[in-house]
Image (spheres, rainbow, N blue to C red):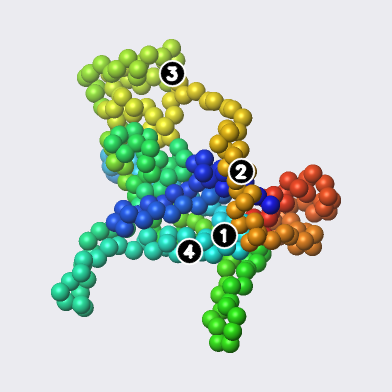
Amino acid sequence: MADYTTALEGAGQKLEFHQLVSNTTVDFKAFVTQFEDQYVSEWNEETVFGRMDPIATFKRTGRKISLGWDIPSYSSQDAVQIMNKISILTRMLYPSYELSAHPSSTHISGPPLMRIKFMNLMQTSFGEFVGQGLLGFVKGFTVSPIFESGFIDGTPAGDGAVGLIYPRGYKMACEFTVLHTHKLGWYGLDETPPASDTDTADETETPAASSRFANNEHGNEYPYGVTRDTEVNVAAPSDDLTAAASASDDVDTEAAREISEAEAQAMLEAMNLPTGVDDNSAEADAWRTWAAGMDSR
């Protein structure tokens, strides 16, 4: 049974984490369950005697992204690789150190800054690093095995072997604070902006005629790389995607195990999906293609 989500991952539908100091990258299929992009402006407010409204002084506008995603495994080998990926990701929370002549002392040489990319929702939309992930820092990752999906016993045979188990699936979450690598705000109050910034018939969406965002001709693409002139092309799956899906039939075929009717029924109940599905129906085939991955998660 093919894991067609691999083809989608190859087409860019993935979460990508890159740590700068170690030049380490790890990615996961984009089973995103939470995406909250928070833009918060901070103001100093001072109240004075006799004045009804506070005197407000602007400080800054910050951006934080709350991210949650599921990590399913398609096969036993996939479960092992996913645990390895999560291990790599957790190691990205640590800084780099300089080797000292005194073994008892260490000096931080680089903080664990990361770039996270999730298609156009989390990427640098213009500037020097356009197309790359957003730069920032993560205060921690939450790793929660999905116990309802079960575990794979990887304990080697033999007396005294150390027990090894691999969860068939995980839920992960983090909060990411964005550090922008380009200017923000409106610039050029006394200058005439380029025609591309003002050439519009919709005056309600047009900024002041003498300013442009981020002092950049592509500033109006912040933050998601989209403008009012962006065209949407909805097409049938490309030949490359179809070929990638077909190729995935040959990946981990032996490692992937079929699920029984009883296991499938238990999985449906655990995932709060409708029960009583005819095992031979088209509906059963549809969810089994996806649920086979959950069987190994």
Question: Could you say which is closer to the camera, residue 190 or residue 75?
Answer: 75
Question: Residue at position x 27%, y 63% from top?
Answer: 96
Quarter of the picture containing the C terminus is bottom right
Question: Could you say which is closer to the camera, residue 91 or residue 249?
Answer: 249
Residue 45 appears anywhere in the view: no
Residues under labels 2 and 3: Cα distance? 45 Å
Q: Work out whether mark 1 precedes mark 3 in sequence or the reverse, and give the earlier one.
A: 1
Q: Could you tell me residue 89's position as x and y percent?
A: 43, 59
Q: Against 1, is 12 above or below?
A: above
Residue 78: give its label.
1
- Residue flagged by tag 4: what amino acid is it? Asn
Q: Work out whether mark 1 precedes mark 4 in sequence or the reverse, and give the earlier one.
A: 1
Check if mark 1's residue and mark 3's residue have beta carbons within 8 Å. no
Q: Residues within 10 Å of mark 2 (few under 14, many from 20)?
A: some
Q: Against 38, is 292 above or below?
A: below
Which residue is the site of mark 3?
204
Question: Residue at position x 54%, y 25% from top?
Answer: 233
Q: Under tag 3, what secondary structure?
A: helix
Residue 84: give its label.
4
Residues under labels 1 and 3: Cα distance? 51 Å
Q: Under tag 4, what secondary structure?
A: helix
